[in-house]
Amino acid sequence: MNTQVNVGSVLSHTLGAEIDIFATCPQSIQVPKDDYLKNVADVARWSEQYGCRGILVYTDNSLVDAWLVSQLIIENTTRLCPLVAVQPVYMHPYTVAKMVSSYGFLYDRRIYLNMVAGGFKNDLNQLNDPTPHDRRYERMIEYVHIIKQLLGAETGISFEGEFYKVDKLRMTPPLPPELFPGVFVSGSSEAGLAAAKAMGAVAVKYPKPPGEYENEPPDETIDSGVRVGIIARDDENEAWNAAYERFPVDRKGELAHQLAMKTSDSVWHKQLSELGATPENNPYWLIPFQHYKTFCPYLVGNYSKVATELARYIALGFTTFILDIPPSEEELYHTGAVFEQAIAQAQVKEVV
């Protein structure tokens, strides 16, 4: 592999609006314990090498702590920004603000926050949190408000809401303005979209095929993103062979997906599950999601075909792309080649 595409900088330079690319960190339950630290460090370095702005770090009751994993990522890269999944039930908003300011102080690194409203109901039940779906987004708005106020104020802040109250609370060490965190939240439900607007957050969707958005594009008043995997090769058959080798059809996985559906109240989970099969030769592929191998749809095919789909998402107004966990450096190379073509196609459309 003699060349590489610096995805992030190329996109920012060639399009009028800035396009952000994030990778995703391996999960501790999917990697042998003895290999996990090296795997995280490798994926972080690959992601930085190929120009990703940051890397998503999952959180739920089954995983090691996302903040500790983020420290490992920071210590093995020079500029990659952790996109830390934050579950409000786990910690007070002051603790999140303290972690952000501490990473800024210790490493001069920006942190992004991926706000998690819920997901698996069993996780919340184990923590004795019966709060209904939409109410969790209302709580999240207060939560993020306190974080932002703490990190942006030079003096102590006071706040009294329905869910949280603080009095003359001050954050030290102070956070430099250029390290102020970006905020992401799921935008698949009406409650999620409303929260994104209230928090000034990027609304991230687990996308449907781009054609289904052409009569219903994302809200132009907020930044929008998609969570999508990519498997692309110069040759179409080679791409699909790689896809089925990585994600074989698995009856056990299909049953696990059905069980997860029963324990999840995520709107995006239900929306993807209801899409069903896609037409033959369509690059939009749901088998990995439907067989519980991953949590997002995939685009599969030759470079040109997948690039065309990405360019359609960009033209619709999606400015952030969160990729699935890269299994190898080679996959990021192929992804970079696809984005390079997608950029060129998006440029032509803008000129026309």
Image (spheres, rainbow, N blue to C red):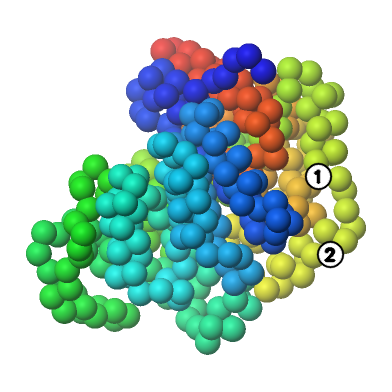
Q: Is residue 207 visible?
A: no
Residue reaching furthest to the left: 155
The image quadrant that residue 157 belongs to is bottom left
Up-down: is 26 above or below 154?
above
Name the residue: 54% across, 20% down: 5
**In the rendered image, which quarter is residue 209 located in?**
top right
Where does the image place residue 211, in percent across and percent down from the top left?
60, 35
> Residue 51 in the image: x percent, y percent?
48, 29
Q: Which mark is residue 247?
A: 1
The kind of residue on which mark 2 rests is Leu
Q: Which residue, as the protein is rendered here, is positioned at the far front?
A: 34
- Report the residue at 37% width, 50% height from top: 111
Side of 188 relative to 278 (left or right) = left
Residue furthest to the right in view is 251
Image check: 269 left or right of 160? right
> In the image, is residue 113 above or below residue 41?
below
Task: List x then y, in percent, for residue 24.
Answer: 57, 46
Q: Nearer the viewer, residue 233 or 215?
A: 233
Residue 242 in view, yes or no: yes
Where disc 1 sits, the SS reads loop
Residue pictured at 60% horizontal, 15% vertical: 3
Task: Where is residue 294? Give x, y as percent.
Answer: 70, 52
Q: Which mark is residue 255?
A: 2
SS under mark 2: helix
| Quarter of the figure with residue 119 | bottom right
For the residues labelled 1 and 2, the Cα–Cα distance comes to: 15 Å
Specify whether 138 is left or right of 284: left
Which of the labelled discs sits on residue 276, or is there none? none
- Binning the other alpha carbons within 10 Å of mark 1 as few (below 14), some (14 to 19) or many (20 upward) gives some
Bin the neighbour count of mark 2 within 10 Å (Cα to Cα): few under 14, some 14-19, many 20 and up.
some
Quadrant of the drawing holding the C terminus: top left
Residue type, label 1: Phe
